[in-house]
């Protein structure tokens, strides 16, 4: 079972320690995404060396391939993928809506056609919990209804109500040792967010997530919703904002009392040639780096920044070498872990506000525009 201790607070920001079956996680934490059981381009050893203590895998994908029973027979997901540390599995609710052909949603569950082979499936709250238990997840997520942005009020209202109903089903179905998190929905409607949070808190779950944000709405709307929900969640349970990935969004949410984050941004952007650095984003293919013999991020201690020049990294992307995406991913994942280490140190010292304004001044000073990658 899960143990969560808030060790220090700095205004609403929290420094915590989350103990899970496969290890301890310092919070606020960023969880690299290994959707299919792999953080793309990196070995589990490399992921661990960045400082990551927990990763996110996906129920929808692992259920379709290789199948949760096969993973269970292989000794569970941690053993199967060679990552002997905590794993959080997302329920697959988001993928059913975003990836699969959704055929029907009822109170019973979500019926969909696989994006792989068109086969038909029904995700019920009970099945989704059973899959995550078979995988051996340290943290399992309730099945949620997460309609694509923008969401009309009637659709948001129905989705939030169904998410609460499904959370009850998940709670009834779980084994006593399963660390099940509820997911607050309600799109961008403050009253729906509040009623969703209250109905989930009544289930007395070991942790709570805020879903259905960071999907394209304006940042101030995101922060407004998060700021309304966190005070309604129990102070002694971890809080997870799903899909928040820009450093400025993570910092804003930590300020509002969020403990856990995940996003495909560092890994996906790494593969496509955008690096997050202490001076903002760097699009490495840009011709200005052709003869740049400096490090990707002079303030970073990762293997990429210690060993290679921007000119060489650009060359790798220009000629299409597989090493380019790997080296940028390695840097980005380390950048996010250093970001979280700095956030934790600042909270520890009671200096979160000073640190964050200094970080953001430097980070924004030379930020380059990059493609939008704001999803899970
Ligand atoms: Zn680096």
Image (tube, rainbow, N blue to C red):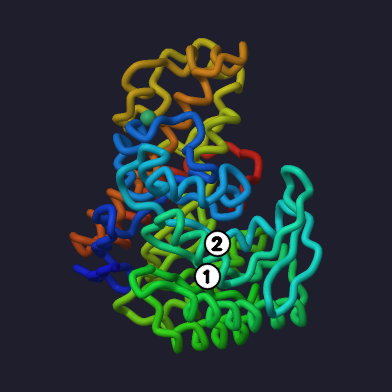
Dot 1: within a 10 Å radius of its alpha carbon, few (fewer than 14), some, or many (20 or more) residues? many
Residue to which mark 2 is pinned? 91
Q: Are marks 1 and 2 in contact (CB under 8 Å)?
A: yes
Q: Which mark is on residue 142?
A: 1
- Residue 74 percent coordinates (x, y): 42, 43
Against 52, is 259 above or below? below
Element under disc 2: loop
In the picture, measured across the screen, residue 106 lies left or right of residue 367, that is: right
- Residue 210 percent coordinates (x, y): 51, 70
Which mark sits nearer the N-terminus, 1 or 2?
2
For the residue pair 183 and 219, the one nearer the viewer reads as 183
In the picture, measured across the screen, residue 166 lies left or right of residue 11, that is: right
Mark 1 and mark 2: Cα distance apart in space: 6 Å
In the picture, measured across the screen, residue 76 lies left or right of residue 282, that is: left
For the residue pair 178 and 348, the one nearer the viewer reads as 178
Residue at image x 70%, y 68%?
A: 110
Element under disc 1: loop
Q: Where, by quadrant of the figure, is residue 268 drawn?
A: top right
Residue at image x 41%, y 31%?
A: 331
The answer to whether residue 338 of the structure is visible from this angle is no
Against 331, is 321 above or below? above
The answer to whether residue 112 of the structure is visible from this angle is yes
**Dot 2 beta carbon under 8 Å from ligand 1:** no
Q: Quadrant of the N terminus?
A: bottom left
Residue placed furthest toward the front: 73
Residue at image x 72%, y 43%?
A: 116
- Residue 246 percent coordinates (x, y): 51, 50
């Amino acid at each position: 079972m899960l143990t969560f201790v808030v060790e220090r607070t700095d205004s609403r920001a929290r420094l915590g320690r989350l103990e899970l079956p496969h290890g301890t996680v310092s919070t606020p934490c960023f969880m690299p995404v290994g959707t299919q059981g792999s953080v793309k381009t990196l070995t589990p050893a490399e992921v661990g060396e960045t400082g990551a203590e927990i990763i996110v895998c996906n129920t929808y994908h692992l259920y379709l391939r290789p199948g949760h029973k096969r993973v269970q027979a292989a000794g569970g997901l941690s053993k199967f993928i060679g990552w002997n540390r905590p794993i959080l599995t997302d329920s697959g609710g988001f993928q059913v809506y975003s990836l699969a052909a959704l055929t029907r949603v009822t109170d019973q569950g979500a019926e969909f056609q696989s994006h792989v082979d068109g086969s038909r499936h029904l995700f019920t709250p009970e099945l989704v919990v059973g899959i995550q238990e078979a995988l051996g997840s340290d943290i399992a997520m309730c099945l949620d209804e997460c309609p694509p942005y923008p969401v009309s009020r009637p659709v948001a209202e129905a989705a939030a109500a169904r998410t609460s109903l499904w959370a009850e089903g998940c709670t009834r179905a779980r084994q006593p040792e399963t660390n099940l998190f509820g997911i607050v929905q309600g799109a961008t409607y403050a009253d729906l967010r509040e009623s969703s949070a209250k109905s989930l808190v009544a289930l007395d779950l070991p942790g709570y997530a805020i879903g259905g944000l960071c999907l394209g709405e304006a940042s101030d709307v995101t922060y407004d919703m998060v700021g309304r929900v966190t005070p309604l969640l129990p102070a002694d349970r971890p809080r997870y904002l799903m899909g928040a990935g820009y450093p400025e969004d993570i910092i804003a949410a930590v300020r509002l009392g969020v403990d856990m984050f995940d996003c495909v941004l560092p890994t996906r952007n790494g593969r496509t040639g955008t690096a997050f650095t202490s001076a903002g984003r760097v699009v490495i293919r840009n011709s200005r780096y052709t003869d740049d013999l400096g490090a990707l991020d002079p303030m970073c201690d990762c293997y990429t920044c210690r060993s290679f020049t921007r000119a060489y990294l650009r060359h790798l992307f220009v000629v299409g070498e597989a090493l380019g995406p790997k080296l940028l991913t390695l840097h980005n994942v380390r950048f996010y872990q250093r970001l979280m280490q700095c956030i934790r140190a600042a909270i520890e010292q009671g200096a979160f506000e000073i640190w964050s304004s200094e970080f953001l001044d430097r980070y924004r000073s030379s930020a380059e525009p990059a493609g939008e990658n704001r999803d899970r």
